[in-house]
């Protein structure tokens, strides 16, 4: 159930050697395989690249040359909304207009995630105006109950509110004011 624990718990377990980054990444990939056909949260992802990044993170952790303060997200799988530039990856913003655009650079957030040691993979769907929408619409009231708790456009297979979270009953707009929203979501 690695896809159901918090990011901070997963990072701690990886740093302690209780779980490998490969296991965590594979758990995410397995969950994507189980539910993304219904939810359509992912526009694309490269499983082989994600596992290669996870293996590199595991080797780095095993070398003993890194500390949690240097790489707080070492080996934690993270996916990006399709509006965040990731060098060499498609960035369509969910739109037909940008259908063939490939980002020539990494956004600052991607650079920082990589510096923190995260396994950065996958492009997440988002809501765009109907005229230019390229991919499936977001979840609706007819969505199966197990997926209704997911924020529109979020990756329900990777991120889901935790019941212990101080922000679990807040709206997406409320999350922008929370200084530590990542602690409120589980992987």
Image (tube, grey):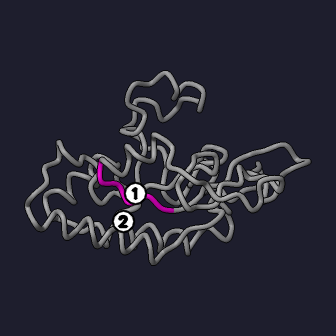
Neighbour tally class for label 1: few under 14, some 14-19, many 20 plus, Cα within 10 Å: some
Q: Which residue is painted at 53% across and 50% down in the image?
A: 105
Mark 2 is surrounded, within 10 Å at the Cα level, by few (under 14), some (14 to 19) or many (20 or more) other residues, namely: few
Per the rendering, the mark at residue 4 is 1
Seen from the viewer's position, the closer of residues 177 and 169 is: 177
**Tag 1's secondary structure?**
helix
Residue at the image position 20 percent from the left and 51 percent from the top: 12
Percent x, y of residue 147:
61, 55
Q: Which residue is mark 2?
A: 1
Q: Point out the stretch of residues depicted in magenta.
A: 116-121
Disc 2 from disc 1: Cα separation: 6 Å
Residue occupying the point 21% across, 60% down: 14
Q: Secondary structure at mark 2?
A: loop
How far from the left and from the top, in percent, is residue 24? 34, 66
Pointer 2 and pointer 1: residues touching (CB < 8 Å)? yes
Within the image, what quadrant is residue 100 found in?
Answer: bottom right
């Amino acid at each position: 159930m690695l896809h159901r624990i918090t990011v901070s718990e997963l990072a701690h377990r990886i740093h302690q050697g209780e779980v490998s980054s490969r296991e965590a990444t594979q758990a995410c990939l397995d969950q994507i395989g189980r539910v993304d056909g219904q939810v359509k949260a992912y526009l694309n992802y490269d499983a082989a690249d994600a596992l290669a990044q996870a293996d590199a993170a595991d080797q780095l952790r095993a070398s003993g040359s890194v500390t949690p303060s240097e790489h707080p997200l070492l080996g934690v799988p993270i996916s990006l909304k399709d509006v965040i530039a990731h060098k060499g990856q498609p960035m369509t913003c969910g739109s037909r207009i940008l259908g063939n655009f490939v980002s020539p650079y990494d956004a600052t957030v991607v650079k920082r995630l990589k510096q923190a040691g995260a396994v950065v993979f996958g492009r997440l769907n988002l809501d765009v105006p109907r005229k230019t929408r390229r991919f499936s619409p977001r979840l609706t009231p007819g969505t199966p109950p197990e997926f209704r708790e997911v924020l529109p456009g979020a990756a329900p297979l990777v991120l889901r509110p935790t019941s212990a979270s101080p922000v679990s009953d807040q709206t997406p707009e409320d999350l922008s004011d929370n200084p530590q929203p990542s602690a409120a979501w589980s992987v």
